[in-house]
Image (cartoon, rainbow, N blue to C red):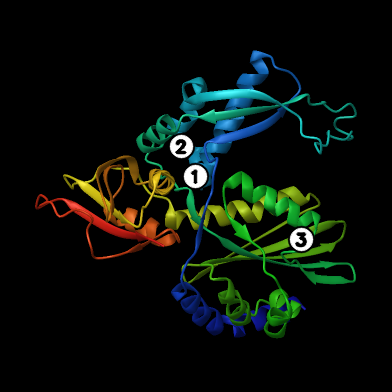
Amino acid sequence: MQLIVKFLRKKSILGLLAGLLLLNSAPVTATVVEHLYEAEFAVSDQTRKTRHEIFQKAFQQVLLKVVGSSVVLGNPLIHEARSHVLKYVSQFRYLELPNDFVQPAATREAPVPELFNNILWIKFDIGEVNKLLKNSQLPVWSKLRPETLVWIAVRDGGQRYVLRQRDKSPIKDEIEKAAKLRGLPIIWPEYDEADRMRLSFVDLWGGFWDNVLTVSRRYQKESVLVGRYLWGAGEWQVEWDLLINQHQKNWQIHSNELDLLSTSGVDKASDLVSAKYALFLRETGASNIYIDIHGVNDIDGYAKIAAYLQGLAPVKDLNASEVSAQGVRFKIDPQGSVDDLKRLIALGSILKPVNIQVSTQPSAQDDVILAYQVR
């Protein structure tokens, strides 16, 4: 059976290459991931010792979200910074446990499990964290992130099914939890009649990538994560494939722990997707960078656009330098290249480029002026 599957996958390679080219030519949509510099952990007490231990765990979790890649864990400057974690904490507070919080169950290793009393919420200083990443020569992944489409095919005994957006499943819950921890936006397919007509369970299980990518183009996502879960011999065997950048990446894992299986797929996917979109913070050679925004008509609109631009990784700070009937001109204090800034704006659905500037004032020869219209 394994030989047949391998043969069929080889037959699908030409379709995979063609499909990846078409998938990457489709418009890419992105979503804003909030709270990248925040973390929450359940705690059993409010002692200084416990708090400091949680600060270090939260710091690692936040760095993984902000960089998007596990490469951050092996950096010596990051390792040193963990010893001085208080420098990077800007706020923290204790919260009540939510009503649906489930206390850990007894296990053979822990017959008397630790019971939690509160949630410790921590927020880290954005400027200090970004400065650390810049000094560590690590990239920052902006909060504007492209979504990854997730296809999961499951063979559990005599059952065979594909997980859909409306389904409830422990596998789905673990994947969503892992994706939230890594700041990787994901969506699930509808897998309605239109999808099923062109993509069967056998197509997903056998790796018929031309069919997978043909159906995936409906969702306009640049990266597609496919997981095949097989239950047998008392454990799950999972084979993962990520289709991105006209390439296919494949890896496998086996375990009886669903959280470990799901994390293995999401973490690798996050590493690969962030490698394309995370940016290295650096100085720019331009003397002044301005961005003109047409269609800002009120205070609320101004606040939303300013917050949006401020959240882009290449923007260190910005200030309104001119306001007119045509719109607002912002002067940007950059920490990345103009090309990086344009690429990130193009990912979103907030602004579209135009050729008309807000200001009629003359500008210096080496000034960079970008012009956009609110969609």
Q: Tell me whether the residue at label 1 lies in contact with that at label 2, contact meaning CB atoms closer than 8 angstroms.
A: yes
In the picture of the structure, the residue carrying the numbered disc 3 is: 237
Where residue 209 sits in the image (x, y, percent)?
Answer: 61, 78
Q: Amino acid at mark 2?
A: Asn
Q: Name the residue nearer the viewer: 224 or 157.
A: 224
Please state if 316 lies on the left or on the right of 157 as rendered.
left
Q: Amino acid at mark 1?
A: Val
Residue at (83% x, 72% y) in the render: 160
Please state if 137 lies on the left or on the right of 275 as rendered.
left
In the picture of the structure, the residue carrying the numbered disc 2 is: 75
Taking 164 as reference, is 38 above or below it?
A: above
Q: Quadrant of the N terminus?
A: bottom right
In the picture of the structure, the residue carrying the numbered disc 1 is: 71
Under circle 1, the secondary element is: helix
Where residue 195 sits in the image (x, y, percent)?
Answer: 68, 79
Q: Amino acid at mark 3?
A: Gln
